[in-house]
Image (cartoon, rainbow, N blue to C red):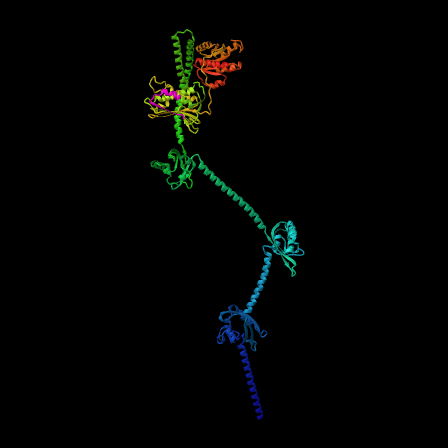
C-alpha cells in the first residue's frame, strides 16, 4: 500500500510537476505569443460578435492613437466610416464553421483623424453549438496599396479612355487621316472624317488605291509631282490638291505626309493628313471678292470723297466767283465769308474782313449810319430783300449795294446770318445817265427836227443863191458895163458869199454840209489856226497852246470845217471873258480804255481819239442853259451879237467827222469843250491845186439837168460863156429823151454829148436813177453831180454810184469850170 501510496504519490507528484511544467510551458508559450502579438507591426485584436474589443495589441493602439484601456471594452465600429459599417456587419455575419476565415477591406479613422484603408483577416471562435463567441482579427494598413491600385485602375481607365478618345479623336478629328502602304499605294487605315467627307464607309475606303480618292487632275499631279518627292524625302507639306467625293464633287485639301520607317530606314507606310481648305479657299475667294469689293467700295468712297471735295470746291468756287456779293457772319458778329465779288466791289480782301471785329467800322465808318444798318437788320429779323446801303470802299469811294438776307428761310450751320448783295452803283448811275440820255434824246429829236427844217430851207436857199450868183457873174462878164453896175454886181456876189456862209452853218448843224475829207495832221494845222486866231483875241485874254508830246495827230477831216469849228469855239470862249482871262487850246490823244460821254448825242464813245480842248476862265454856262447850247438859233447874247448857230455848227461838224463833243462848266469858273475826232493810222499828202485862170470850153456838148428853171437857164448861159455847147433837161426823163434824140455819141461836132451835169433831187426821175439808166444806155458817158447838199448820199457814195465828181451849190464859177475841165480831160 505504501508502495502503492508512494507510487501514487510519486505519480501524483510527477503529474503535478508535469502539470507545472505544462503550465509553465503554456505560460511561456502565452508569453511568447503575447510578446509576438504585442510587438507585431500588424494590428491584432479580439472582439465579441457585437464589436466590443476584448484585446488589442500595441500596434492597434498606436494606429488609433489611444491607450489600451481606451479601446478594450469599446466597439471598434466607431473607428469605421459610417458608410462602411453596414458592409462590415454583413461581413461578420457571413461566417460559419464551413467558412471560418474571411478577409475584408474598409476605410477607418486612424490617429489624427486620418481616413485610412485597412485589410482585416477575421477568424471566429465557435462554441460547441457552432455559435460565434469571439473573433480574432489581424489587420494592416493597405492605404498605399489601395491607392496604388486605384491609381493603376485610374491609369488603366485613363488609358482605356485615352485609347477610346484617341480613336474618337482619330475618327472624329476635323482633319482627314489615312495611312498608305508605301509599296502598293493602297489605303491601310483611315479615320471616319475622311470616309464621311468623301461619302464612303471606312470599309469602302480601306484597301483602295490612294489615287482613286483624288480628282483626276490632282491624281495625275500627285503621281507625277507629289509622290516622287515623298519617295525621296519621306515628307510632303503644303501641297493643295482636290479629293473627289463619291458623288463626283470635289473637296479642296492641303496635304501633309510623313513616313513611318523600319529599323533599316525603309518607308513602310505614310501617314497622310488631309486638311479641308474648301472653306478657306472659298473664304479666300470670298475675301478676294470682299477685298475687291472693299477696294471698289473704297475707290468709290474715295471717288465719292473726291467728288464731294470737288463738289465742295466747285461750290466754294461758285460762291467765291459768283457775280454777286456773298457774306456771312457768325454768332459773335464776325465775318466768316467774304467772297471775291465783295473784294472786288469794296477793295477789302477776305484777310482784312474775315475774323476782323472791326470790319463793320471799315465798311460803315459813320457810326450813325452803321447803327442804322444794324438796327434795320435786327428790325427785320435777318429776313429782308433789296435793302440799299452805301458801303465805304478801301479807296475811299462809296458803292451802293442792294442786300437780300434770307438767313431765317435758308439757315446754314455756323452762319448766324448770310446775305447776297448786288452792286447797283452803276445801275443807279445808268438810271441817272438814262434819264440824262432821254433828255438828250428829246433834245436830239428837237435838234433833228430843226436841222431837217433848216436843211430843207438851206437846199432851196442854195438854189436861189446859185441863180443870183450866176446872173451877177454874167453882169460882170458883160463888156462896157457902167461902173455902178459892176460895183452892184460885185456887191451881189459878196453878199451871196456871206449868205452861202450862213447856209453853210445851217448845213453844218444839220450835218448835211458836204465835206472834203482827207488825212490831215492836226498838230501843224492847230498851230497855224491859232496863229491866225490870235489876231481876233484881245490883249486882255492870255492865249496858251499845248500840242502835247505826240509827233503827229492824224485824222481824216475837212480842214475848212475843222477850222470853222475851232474858230467858233475860240470866239465863244472870247465872248465869255469880256473882262479878260485865260484861253487854253490843247491837243492830245485819248487812250482806248477811257470812256467819253458825248454831250450832244448822249452815247458813250470808246476807242482811239484825237482830242481838241478849248478852255476859258469865263462866266461859265448856267445849268438851265446847258441843255440847249447846241440848239440852232438859241443864244443868250444881245440882239445883233450872235445868230445862235456857232455851237450848233461845231456840234454838226464834229458829228459829221464821226466824232463826239463834251462840255465841262461851272458858273463863275469857266467852261471847257472837248472835241473828239477818230484817230487815223497815217498821214497822206494831199495835192493842192495851183491858182490859175478859169478854164474855158472847147465846144464840147454838156447836158445840164436841173429842175429849177432859173438855175437851169442861168447855168446854161454860164456854160455857154465858158465856151460849151449846152443841152438842158428839167428832170431825168427829159435828159434820157435828149440823149436818145442826139442818138448816141457819134464824133460829129454837136452830135454827141460829152458830159452830163445833173441835179440829184428832181421830180419824176432823180440824178441817181438817171445815172443808172445812162450807165445802161451809154456806159462811157461822163456824169457830174450837182446838189445843194448831200442828203442820204455822201460824196464817196455818189462817186461809187458812177459820178466822176460832185459840185455843191452855191458854187464859185472858177470852181465849176475846173471840175468840168478836169472831168472832160480825164481818160
Number of disc labels: 0
Q: Nearer the viewer, residue 239 or 758?
A: 758
Residue 543 belongs to the span the image colors magenta? yes
**Residue 309 magenta-highlighted:** no
Quadrant occupied by the N terminus? bottom right
Task: Tell which residue pokes out farthest to the left in this image.
Answer: 579
Q: Which region shows up in magenta?
A: 529-547
Question: Which residue lies at the image location 39% right of the left edge and 29% below the top edge?
Answer: 429
Residue found at the far right of this picture: 184
Is residue 313 visible in this depiction of the protein?
A: yes
* Horizontal and vertical percent position of residue 521: 44, 23
Q: Position of residue 81 (x, y in %)?
A: 51, 69
- Give the percent coordinates (x, y) of residue 564: 40, 20
The front one of 655 and 268 is 655
Measuring from the top left, give residue 382's x and y in whole percent: 38, 38
Residue 336 can be seen, yes or no: no
**Eyeballing the image, is 105 above or below 240?**
below
Q: Is residue 389 left or right of residue 686?
A: left
Q: From the viewer's perspective, is residue 810 above or below residue 595?
A: above
Q: Is residue 248 left or right of residue 754?
A: right
Q: Nearer the viewer, residue 336 or 603?
A: 603
Amino acid at each position: 500500500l505504501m508502495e502503492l501510496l508512494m507510487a501514487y504519490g510519486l505519480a501524483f507528484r510527477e503529474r503535478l510537476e508535469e502539470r507545472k511544467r505544462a503550465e509553465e510551458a503554456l505560460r511561456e508559450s502565452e508569453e511568447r505569443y503575447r510578446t509576438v502579438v504585442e510587438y507585431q507591426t500588424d494590428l491584432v485584436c479580439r472582439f465579441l460578435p457585437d464589436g466590443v474589443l476584448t484585446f488589442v495589441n500595441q500596434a492597434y493602439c498606436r494606429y488609433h492613437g489611444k491607450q489600451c484601456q481606451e479601446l478594450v471594452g469599446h466597439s471598434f465600429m466607431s473607428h469605421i466610416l459610417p458608410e462602411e459599417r453596414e458592409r462590415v456587419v454583413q461581413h461578420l455575419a457571413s461566417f460559419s464553421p464551413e467558412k471560418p476565415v474571411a478577409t475584408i477591406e474598409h476605410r477607418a479613422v486612424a490617429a489624427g483623424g486620418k481616413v485610412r484603408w485597412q485589410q482585416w483577416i477575421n477568424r471566429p471562435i465557435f462554441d460547441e453549438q457552432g455559435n460565434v463567441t469571439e473573433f480574432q482579427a489581424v489587420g494592416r494598413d493597405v492605404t498605399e496599396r489601395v491607392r496604388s491600385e486605384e491609381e493603376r485602375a485610374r491609369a488603366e481607365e485613363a488609358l482605356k479612355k485615352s485609347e477610346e478618345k484617341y480613336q474618337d479623336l482619330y475618327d472624329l478629328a476635323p482633319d482627314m487621316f489615312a495611312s498608305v502602304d508605301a509599296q502598293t499605294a493602297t489605303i491601310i487605315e483611315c479615320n471616319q472624317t475622311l470616309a464621311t467627307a468623301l461619302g464612303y464607309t471606312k470599309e469602302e475606303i480601306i484597301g483602295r488605291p490612294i489615287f482613286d480618292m483624288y480628282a483626276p487632275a490632282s491624281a495625275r499631279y500627285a503621281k507625277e509631282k507629289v509622290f516622287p518627292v515623298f519617295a525621296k524625302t519621306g515628307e510632303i507639306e503644303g501641297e493643295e490638291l482636290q479629293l473627289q467625293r463619291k458623288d463626283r464633287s470635289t473637296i479642296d485639301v492641303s496635304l501633309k505626309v510623313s513616313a513611318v520607317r523600319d529599323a533599316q530606314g525603309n518607308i513602310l507606310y505614310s501617314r497622310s493628313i488631309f486638311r479641308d481648305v474648301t472653306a478657306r479657299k472659298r473664304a479666300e475667294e470670298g475675301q478676294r471678292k470682299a477685298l475687291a469689293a472693299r477696294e471698289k467700295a473704297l475707290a468709290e468712297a474715295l471717288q465719292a470723297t473726291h467728288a464731294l471735295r470737288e463738289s465742295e470746291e466747285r461750290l466754294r468756287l461758285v460762291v467765291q466767283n459768283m457775280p454777286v456779293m456773298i457774306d456771312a457772319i457768325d454768332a459773335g458778329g464776325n465775318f466768316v465769308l467774304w467772297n471775291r465779288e465783295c473784294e472786288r466791289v469794296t477793295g477789302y480782301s477776305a484777310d482784312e474782313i474775315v475774323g476782323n471785329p472791326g470790319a463793320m467800322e471799315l465798311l460803315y465808318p459813320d457810326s450813325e449810319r452803321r447803327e442804322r444798318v444794324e438796327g434795320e437788320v435786327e428790325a427785320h429779323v435777318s429776313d429782308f430783300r433789296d435793302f440799299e446801303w452805301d458801303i465805304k470802299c478801301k479807296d475811299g469811294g462809296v458803292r451802293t449795294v442792294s442786300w437780300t438776307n434770307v438767313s431765317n428761310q435758308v439757315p446754314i450751320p455756323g452762319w448766324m446770318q448770310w446775305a447776297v448783295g448786288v452792286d447797283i452803283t452803276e445801275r443807279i448811275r445808268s438810271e441817272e445817265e438814262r434819264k440824262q440820255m432821254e433828255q438828250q434824246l428829246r433834245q436830239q429829236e428837237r435838234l433833228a427836227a430843226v436841222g431837217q427844217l433848216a436843211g430843207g430851207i438851206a437846199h432851196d436857199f442854195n438854189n436861189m443863191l446859185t441863180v443870183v450868183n450866176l446872173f451877177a457873174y454874167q453882169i460882170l462878164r458883160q463888156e462896157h458895163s457902167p461902173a455902178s453896175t459892176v460895183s452892184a454886181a460885185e456887191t451881189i456876189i459878196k453878199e451871196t458869199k456871206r449868205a452861202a456862209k450862213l447856209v453853210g452853218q445851217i448845213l453844218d448843224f444839220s450835218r448835211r454840209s458836204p465835206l472834203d475829207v482827207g488825212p490831215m495832221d492836226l498838230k501843224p494845222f492847230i498851230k497855224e489856226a491859232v496863229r491866225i486866231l490870235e489876231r481876233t483875241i484881245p490883249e486882255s485874254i492870255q492865249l496858251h497852246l499845248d500840242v502835247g508830246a505826240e509827233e503827229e495827230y492824224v485824222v481824216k477831216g475837212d480842214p475848212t470845217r475843222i477850222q470853222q469849228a475851232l474858230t467858233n469855239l475860240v470866239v465863244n470862249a472870247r465872248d465869255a471873258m469880256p473882262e479878260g482871262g485865260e484861253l487854253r487850246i490843247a491837243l492830245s490823244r485819248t487812250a482806248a480804255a477811257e470812256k467819253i460821254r458825248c454831250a450832244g448825242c448822249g452815247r458813250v464813245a470808246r476807242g482811239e481819239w484825237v482830242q481838241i480842248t478849248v478852255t476859258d476862265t469865263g462866266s461859265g454856262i448856267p445849268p438851265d442853259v446847258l441843255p440847249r447850247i447846241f440848239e440852232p438859233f438859241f443864244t443868250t447874247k444881245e440882239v445883233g451879237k450872235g445868230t445862235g448857230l456857232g455851237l450848233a455848227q461845231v456840234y454838226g461838224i464834229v458829228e459829221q467827222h464821226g466824232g463826239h463833243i463834251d462840255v465841262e462848266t461851272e458858273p463863275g469858273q469857266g467852261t471847257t469843250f472837248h472835241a473828239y475826232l477818230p484817230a487815223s493810222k497815217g498821214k497822206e499828202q494831199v495835192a493842192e491845186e495851183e491858182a490859175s485862170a478859169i478854164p474855158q470850153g472847147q465846144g464840147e456838148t454838156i447836158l445840164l439837168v436841173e429842175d429849177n428853171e432859173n438855175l437851169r437857164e442861168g447855168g446854161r448861159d454860164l456854160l455857154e460863156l465858158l465856151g460849151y455847147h449846152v443841152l438842158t433837161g428839167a428832170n431825168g426823163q427829159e435828159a434820157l429823151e435828149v440823149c436818145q434824140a442826139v442818138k448816141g455819141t457819134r464824133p460829129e461836132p454837136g452830135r454827141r454829148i460829152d458830159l452830163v451835169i445833173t441835179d440829184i433831187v428832181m421830180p419824176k426821175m432823180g440824178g441817181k436813177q438817171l445815172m443808172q439808166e445812162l450807165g445802161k444806155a451809154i456806159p462811157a458817158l461822163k456824169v457830174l453831180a450837182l446838189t445843194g447838199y448831200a442828203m442820204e448820199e455822201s460824196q464817196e457814195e455818189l462817186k461809187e454810184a458812177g459820178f466822176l465828181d460832185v459840185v455843191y451849190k452855191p458854187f464859185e464859177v472858177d470852181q465849176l469850170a475846173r471840175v468840168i475841165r478836169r472831168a472832160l480831160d480825164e481818160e
